[in-house]
Amino acid sequence: MRDIFGDTKRTYSPDNLVKVPVNQLQPGMFVAELDVPWSETPFLMQGFEIRDRSNILKLESYCDYVYVLKDDGQRKPKSMPKPSRALAPPPKNTKGFMINRSPTRRAPQKSADKKPLMRRRPAYATEVAAEVEHVRAREIYDFCKTGTKQLLLAAKKDEVFDIAAARDIVARCIDSILRNPDALIWMTKIKHEKDYLVEHCLNVCILSIVFGRHLRFSSEELHEIGLCGLSHQIGKVKIPAAILAKPGELNEDERRAMQNHPLESHKLLSDASTASKTVIDVALCHRERPDGRGYPRGLTADRIPEYARIIAVVNAYDAMVSKRAYAEAKSPEAVQKIIYDGRGEQFDDNCALAFMQAIGLYPAGTWVELRNGKVAVVLSGKEGFRHLPTVIVVSDDEKNPVDEVVLDLYLTDSGSLDKGYLIQRTLPDGSFGFDLDKLQINE
């Protein structure tokens, strides 16, 4: 069986599958197969454990029956040595986020927070169409990128972090995201390697706010999580440029210097008298891991603040979808598979799953090739149907440019649009000569 991330290693023996009517499912069962194609459902992962009644209710909307595993031994957690409370040695590749993992995942580490990640507030309504917000979003992104660059330059000179300027950047991003999140998500997909740190700080700010919007954060919480995202890696300006730009593996001294950036961020923000404790704590703790193998303090899940767990996921996501000196950019679905596999060890389980739901497999600004061979770019997602976004078709089946056409792939579900327009695969920016930065969306 092949999953939506292209992983052919996950197979289930027919002898280990039981056909179960959806109305007889129970929490704890592992759904391995559906009675309909996975691509025609909103389920992010092909194969998942039923956690509560809401999973069953969603299955009832698409399936009459499913196949569950009789024996989930292949998913049993393995035992691992208890990590030290001292400075924990990280995985070898500390510049990136790939980790060497066993095929089985250990049981997720529980956090101490009793407050649910999803707030009990009404969901935010989208106020305008993505194409309407695009012009303003591009102006906002450019303005905020300049402001973020100034914040980093000031920090490099040991100047006090300008919280007021940072809050202004966050407020502008929130205004756009509340109108329509897809326009600024698109802007985060336009990458310039020479501006990596500046764009990364701003992108984590934007994606954290998008995530917070999905979690129904209050206005105050959105401003706080956005500020955490913007400032979380400000201490990297103190790391020698030769280390940040090194294409190969870091040596021991370089790794120690890299691991020091949360402490540098903590110091810079602590010197700003108006920085909140939350913002300062996130800067210090965003590289901690639930399994205790993070840095700088090797904290376990119960000691990592909620916002730090959120920023850890968003930080990793934006880093991996970006080209860096030591790693090529990965596709959104490849990165989400890494995050999914890292649940409970590298990433908080709930934060990882919720972020994947918030951002979707095909975020705005993602280039895709359709089954009919045409090239398109994702304009916006559809809540509950992230696998069927609205796209802008920019080529014919021979990859020749054509007049742009906006299509809602959700129409394939009803037969109003040919299934040849379903997404076949994602493409890197620049494929077949199509560049996101040169594509202008007008109202």
Image: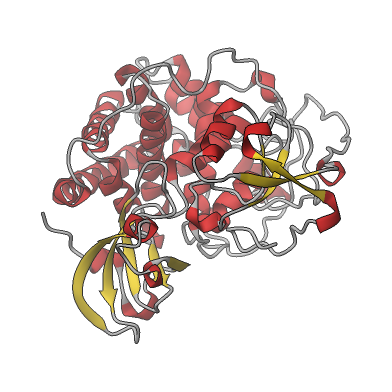
Q: Is residue 253 left or right of residue 383?
A: right
Height in image: 256 above or below 226? Answer: below
Residue 255 placed where, x, y %? 67, 47
Task: Using the rendered view, name the quadrant where residue 344 is placed.
Answer: top right
The answer to whether residue 397 shows anywhere in this view is: yes
Residue drawn at point x = 56 percent, y = 45 percent: 63
Q: Quadrant of the C terminus?
A: bottom left
Indicate the position of residue 78 as horizontal and vertical percent values: 87, 39
Q: Residue at x 57, y 62 (%)?
A: 326
Q: Quadrant of residue 57?
A: top right
Q: Nearer the viewer, residue 30 or 397?
A: 30
Vertical comparison of 14 with 383: above or below: below
Q: How many marks?
A: 0
Residue at the image position 41 percent from the left and 61 percent from the top? 193
The residue at the point 32 percent across, 64 percent down is 377
Residue 288 makes an appearance in the image: no
Q: Is residue 140 shown left or right of residue 285?
A: left
Left or right: where 55 falls relative to 40: right
